[in-house]
Amino acid sequence: MTSEVSRRLPGDPPPADAIARMLRVDHAGEYGATRIYEGQLEVLGHGRAGVIRQMVEAEGRHLARFETLLRERRVRPTLLHPLWTVAGYTLGAATALLGERAAMACTVAVEEVSDEHYRRQAEQLGNADPALRETLLSFRDDEIAHRDLAIREGAQESAGYDLISAVVKTGSRLAIWLSTRL
């Protein structure tokens, strides 16, 4: 199986640059997820949000792994890191202000985009970097579990579920696009 990273066209970035972009955007995504959950916890209160605490711990482990990979591979984080600090927290707090189910609706949307994103990256890597591919697929499994947990917690019964989902997915995809490039 040939990977997308190895099927380069003239003008495509070298494989090391493509992998650096993956690491940069994944670090940004995991950082943004931790900020979303921190905003939700602040609004909902730490005592009432055991499910969110479980998810933020997993995202924190993912973030720590990407921070290590950035250092080991000498990849800089996205230039938009300060923006994601504010945007992630604001999104988390705003959805939590709408209630616990709305916070869970936010989680479903973010994790569905993360699932697509990690799957696509793993396909692009193919066998070019087996260890990174395994990390991405493992983290993807965690994101799917978070989505499923949020659904069980009533995300789809949230008032405005479709609107929350559409807005959060659009914002998440835009953040991915920007963080890959900057």
Image (cartoon, rainbow, N blue to C red):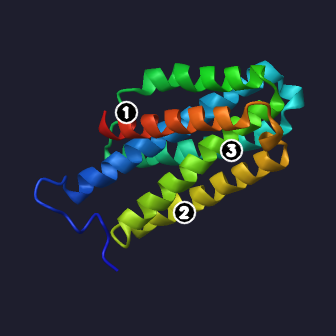
Q: Residues within 10 Å of mark 2 (few under 14, many from 20)?
A: some
Secondary-structure class at tag 1: loop
Residue 51 coordinates in the image, percent (x, y): 81, 41
Q: Could you give the CA–CA distance between mark 2 and mark 1, rounded to whole angstroms?
A: 22 Å
Q: Indicate the quadrant containing the C terminus: top left, top right, bottom left or bottom right.
A: top left
State which quadrant residue 132 falls in.
bottom left
Marks 3 and 1, the one that precedes in the sequence: 1
Q: Indicate the quadrant containing the N terminus: top left, top right, bottom left or bottom right.
A: bottom left
Can you tell which mark lies on residue 78?
1
Q: Amino acid at mark 1?
A: Thr
Q: Could you give the CA–CA distance between mark 3 and mark 2, rounded to whole angstroms?
A: 18 Å
Secondary-structure class at tag 3: helix
Residue 85 coordinates in the image, percent (x, y): 52, 23
Q: Which residue is mark 2?
A: 137
User: Is disc 3 in contact with disc 2, using a CB cutoff of under 8 Å?
Assistant: no
Residue 48 coordinates in the image, percent (x, y): 89, 29
Out of 136 and 91, give the one closest to the viewer: 91
Residue 121 coordinates in the image, percent (x, y): 42, 58
Q: Amino acid at mark 2?
A: Leu
Residue found at x 45% / y 64%: 133
Out of 20 and 86, give the one closest to the viewer: 86
Would you say 29 lies left or right of 123 here?
Answer: right
